């Protein structure tokens, strides 16, 4: 800066000296003017280069300037670098924010003042049947045609949420979407969506469960109450009295069985998955189940069933013995209850080709129609309600089986043909199965 100032000052002095040497005041003024003009031209060039650089808005490719203009250039360049770094940080935070919204299980839609879609995440697109790219700028009322939503948008009362049918709604696969609009800014709107299908199904199952439990308990209670009133109001012969007491005992036992099954289900749902430290002998389970099934057959059937334990590999199963016994016993007892007397029941263990093991129970009963198979493991679901009550079933046995098997990492498979019998299979993963360890 000093060198440049000295150079320009020298030009002025040289011009003045030239005029003085001529002995002319005018010449001296002309020389000083020429020097000043040179100074001004140099400053103008520097200012022009600085303005051009500022107009381009580029931090890189800066001109080489000296003096005051160079100092001004350096300070502006530092300011630009700070602003650029701050802008990059803001962009990064915005990207992180959008990524977080994109990963949200709830849908997010941003609407402008006219109700057009400005942005939406993939979740909202799936909930409402939108295309996150193609539908940008489209009016939301044209994309979501539900009459409930259109009325909600028209009324403008967004203090509560509404529910609409999801895209591709089918009677066999209900799909419910809850959404609510939140105004913000200048007539802009934020719309949040969430899938409440599972919540509604759970609520429906809860209502059905309470209704079924009430119904199952009400029936034996009505019978018991009727017998008690009869015995209290009417003198009975000893034979009638004994018969009534027997029926009352049967209904009380039915209620006790129902309560025990409910407690079992509650315990299974509320406890953690079993570990892998306890190993149960598969042959021992099989022998106990066969013994119980034979005892039940002699109790309820005029002609006992032919119950066969099929030979299989010597296995040990990792899990809770009481739970595994409850699961396999339920399958065996169901086969006995629903297979006519004299029928054949086969059960045993077998190894799966891809690893793991299966416990199967095959009967020669009447079979089950295909439309009932997907729902057999639901609580209180019965193919024939009158037949189930006659055989003493609570409608919870297969639900218990499903919970036990799932807690042990397995699955329940059911195959049945009407008139040809049914086969129930419990499949367990390889991590839960090993060859039996010999005592020798």
Image: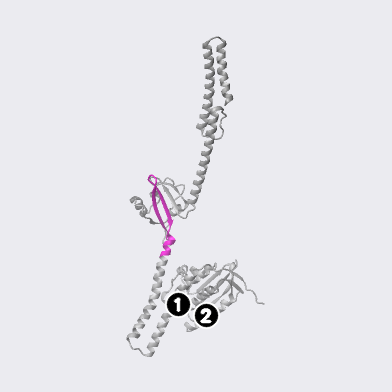
In this rendering, the answer to whether 195 lies above or below 235 is above
Count of numbered circles in the view: 2
Placement of the C terminus among the 4 image quadrants: bottom right
Q: What is the spatial separation of the Cα atoms under label 2 and label 1, in whole angstroms?
A: 16 Å
In this figure, which residue is indicated by the disc labeled 1? 257
Specify whether residue 201 is painted magenta.
Answer: yes
x then y, percent, for residue 394: 44, 75
In this figure, which residue is indicated by the disc labeled 2? 292
State the extent of the magenta-drawn residues as a range: 174-203
Q: Pick whichever, 27 or 81, lies toward us.
A: 27
Q: How is the image coloured?
A: one colour
**Is residue 282 visible to us here?**
yes
Q: Residues within 10 Å of mark 2 (few under 14, many from 20)?
A: few
Please identify, in this view, whether the residue under mark 2 or under mark 1 is nearer the observer.
1
In this rendering, the answer to whether 286 lies above or below 410 is below
Specify which label sits upstream in the sequence, 2 or 1.
1
Which of the 4 image quadrants contains residue 106?
A: bottom left
Which of the 4 image quadrants contains residue 31?
A: top right
Placement of the N terminus among the 4 image quadrants: top right
| Disc 2 and disc 1 in contact, CB within 8 angstroms | no
Q: Residues within 10 Å of mark 1 (few under 14, many from 20)?
A: some
Specify whether residue 191 is painted magenta.
Answer: yes
x then y, percent, for residue 282: 58, 75
Q: Pick whichever, 362 or 217, lies toward us.
A: 217
Q: Secondary structure at mark 2?
A: helix
């Amino acid at each position: 800066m000093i060198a440049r100032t000295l150079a320009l000052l020298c030009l002025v002095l040289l011009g003045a000296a030239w005029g003085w040497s001529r002995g002319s005041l005018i010449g001296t003024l002309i020389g000083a003017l020429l020097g000043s003009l040179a100074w001004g031209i140099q400053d103008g060039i520097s200012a022009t280069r600085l303005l051009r650089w500022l107009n381009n808005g580029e931090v890189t490719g800066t001109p080489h300037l000296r003096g005051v203009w160079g100092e001004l250039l350096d300070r502006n360049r530092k300011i630009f670098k700070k602003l650029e770094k701050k802008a990059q940080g803001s962009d990064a935070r915005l990207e992180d924010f959008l990524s977080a919204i994109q990963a949200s299980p709830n849908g997010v839609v941003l609407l402008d003042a006219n109700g057009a879609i400005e942005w939406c995440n993939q979740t909202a697109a799936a909930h409402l049947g939108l295309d996150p790219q193609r539908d940008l700028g489209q009016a939301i009322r044209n994309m979501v045609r539900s009459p409930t939503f259109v009325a909600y948008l028209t009324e403008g009362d967004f203090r509560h949420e509404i529910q609409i049918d999801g895209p591709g709604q089918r009677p066999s696969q209900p799909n419910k979407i809850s959404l609510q609009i939140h105004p913000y800014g200048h007539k802009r709107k934020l719309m949040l969506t969430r899938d409440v299908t599972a919540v509604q199904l759970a609520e429906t199952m809860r209502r059905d469960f309470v209704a079924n439990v009430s119904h199952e308990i009400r029936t034996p209670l009505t019978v018991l109450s009727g017998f008690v009133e009869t015995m209290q109001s009417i003198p009975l012969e000893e034979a009638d009295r004994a018969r009534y007491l027997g029926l009352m005992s049967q209904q009380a036992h039915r209620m006790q069985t129902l309560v025990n099954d409910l407690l079992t289900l509650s315990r299974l749902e509320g406890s953690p998955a079993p570990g892998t430290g306890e190993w149960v002998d598969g042959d021992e389970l099989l022998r106990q189940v066969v013994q119980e099934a034979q005892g039940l057959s002699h109790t309820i059937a005029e002609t006992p069933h032919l119950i066969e334990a099929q030979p299989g590999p010597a296995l040990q199963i990792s899990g809770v013995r009481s739970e595994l016994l409850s699961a396999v016993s339920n399958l065996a007892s169901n086969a006995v209850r629903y297979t006519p007397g004299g029928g054949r029941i086969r059960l045993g263990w077998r190894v799966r080709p891809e690893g793991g093991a299966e416990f199967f129970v095959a009967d020669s009963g009447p079979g089950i129609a295909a439309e009932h198979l997907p729902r057999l493991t639901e609580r209180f679901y019965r193919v024939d309600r009158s037949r189930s009550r006659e055989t003493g079933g609570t409608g919870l046995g297969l639900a218990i089986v499903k919970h036990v098997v799932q807690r042990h990492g397995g699955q329940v498979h059911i195959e049945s043909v009407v008139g040809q019998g049914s086969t129930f299979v419990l499949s367990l993963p390889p991590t839960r199965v090993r060859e039996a360890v010999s005592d020798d």
